[in-house]
Each structure stands twice: as structure tokens, then as C-alpha cells.
Image (cartoon, rainbow, N blue to C red):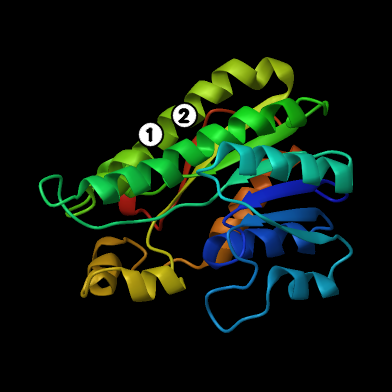
Amino acid sequence: MVTDTTAVVTGGASGIGREICRAFGEAGANVVVADLREEPFADAPSVGELFEEFEGEALYVETDVTDESSVEAMFETAEDRFGSVETLVNNAGIARFGSVTETSAEDWQAELAVNLTGIFHCCKHGIPVLEENESAAIINISSAYGIRGGIGNFGYSTTKGGVVAATKQVATEYARDGVRTNAVVPGFIDTRMFEEDTPEGTEEFAIKHTPQRRLGEASEVASTVRFLASEDASFVNGQILAVDGGFTNT
């Protein structure tokens, strides 16, 4: 269980991140919502409002994962408030669409900055905090397109593939210090970003090519993240766990 622990969730205000925060809250954990904004994108309760029903506490800390000093300050705030952090969920990410020849330098740098440099900053400053516990966990959110690639997703696929490599590296190096590191690989998940930011026809493609013939729910990703953070997964390290209805098998 993750009761009475503290989790940092980057990009925790909306979408999958918000559901991850909810999953930890339902289990009695505290959550640091590390995001550029406090309110969700959709017309829905904020994480703080959700936590009014839970025993744990939600603390919003405005955080830009592309800015190392911002990430360092966020972890300092988390320790000051809760005393320790047992879980880091690197969820913050962005997607830009285009083949390699269509991708602008600006879009490429933006995806690198959030999807990969953000994880670098959070692991660099989070691991010393996590190591203060006897056991701790990092869960990185990759993507099915980081495993198999996709048409018109050069920057996103490449950076999410880098998340997989970073996961295996950190898992190998820091397990001896009590920090387990795994990655969750969502497939097509029914979120606001999926509805509004993906090209026309994506939903039909997703359902057709997902063996379970439906979109996933953000709560299904969140429950997997919570499992990996818990002692139930105490001997799970360096794994890349797909929550995709079988999409990466096709």
C-alpha cells in the first residue's frame, strides 16, 4: 500500500496525471501536484478539491520541469511540508505532430525539453530525496509510440523511446540504494488531450488497432502506477509495463 506516503506527480493537474493523484489520494497518500497550472484543463474539480474526500493532503507547487531550479525548489518544498517523498511519477509530457521532415526545430526542442530533460531534472533532484527512505519508487510515463513508433509522431515517439531507455538506466544504477524504477506505457487513453489535440480520425484508428477494441481510461493507467509504487511491486524494477489493450502487440 501507499498509505501515509508522499508522491510527487509532475503534470498532475489534468488528464492522466490528475487520475494518478486521485489514485494515490484514495489510498491515503499525500500528493505534490507539480504542474504549471493548478486547475485542470477540463471543467472538473482540481486535485485539491478531490482531496477534500481523502485522508491525505494535496499540495500544488507551480513547477516547470524544463527549468532545473524550478524542479529543485519543488522538491525542497515537498520535503519541508511532508518530511519525505517516497514516490516520483514523471508524467509531464507534450506532443507535437509531424514526420521527421515536417518537424520544426522549435517543436523538436520543446518535446525534448519536457519529455526528456524534464525527467532528467526530476530524477537528478528527486533521487537524493527518495534515497532517504528504505524503499522508494520512480514511475516514468512513456507511450506506446515510444515502443513501436507511429506515423507523424517523430518527436513524440523519439522522446518517449528515450523515457524507456532512461528508465532502464536509472533502474540499474539506483536499485541498490532502494529506489525501484519502472515505466508505464499507455496506449490510446480517453483524455482531453486525446480528444482535442490528436489528428482527425485518430479515435477510429485507435479502436481498430487496439485488440480490446476500445480506448483506455485514465484510471486504468493510474491504478497501474499506484501498484508499481506500492510494496506489492517490491521486486519489480526496470520493467516497461504497457497499459494499451494490446496495441503494442499488433
In the rendered structure, which amino acid carries the disc numbered 1?
Gly
Q: Is residue 166 left or right of residue 7?
A: left
Point out residue 52 in the picture as x, y percentages from the top left corner.
84, 74
* Residue at x 40%, y 58% (from the top left corner): 245
Instruction: Work out whether residue 214 can be spotted.
Output: no
Q: Label 2: how many residues lie within 10 Å, few (<14), some (14-19) or many (20+)?
A: many
Residues packed near mark 1 inside 10 Å, few (<14), some (14 to 19) or many (20 plus):
some
Q: Label 1's element?
A: helix
Residues marked 2 and 1 touching at CB (< 8 Å): yes
| Residue 236, above or below 81 | above
Outermost residue to the left: 101
Badge 2 element: helix
- Examine the image and state in which quarter residue 50 appears: bottom right
Residue that appears at 76% across and 55% down: 31
Task: Specify whether 198 is left or right of 26.
Answer: left
Residue linked to disc 1: 162
Total marks in image: 2
Q: Looking at the picture, how far across and down is residue 152, in whole percent?
A: 18, 55
The residue tagged 2 is 166
The answer to whether residue 4 is visible is: yes
Residue 148, located in which quarter of the rendered image?
top left
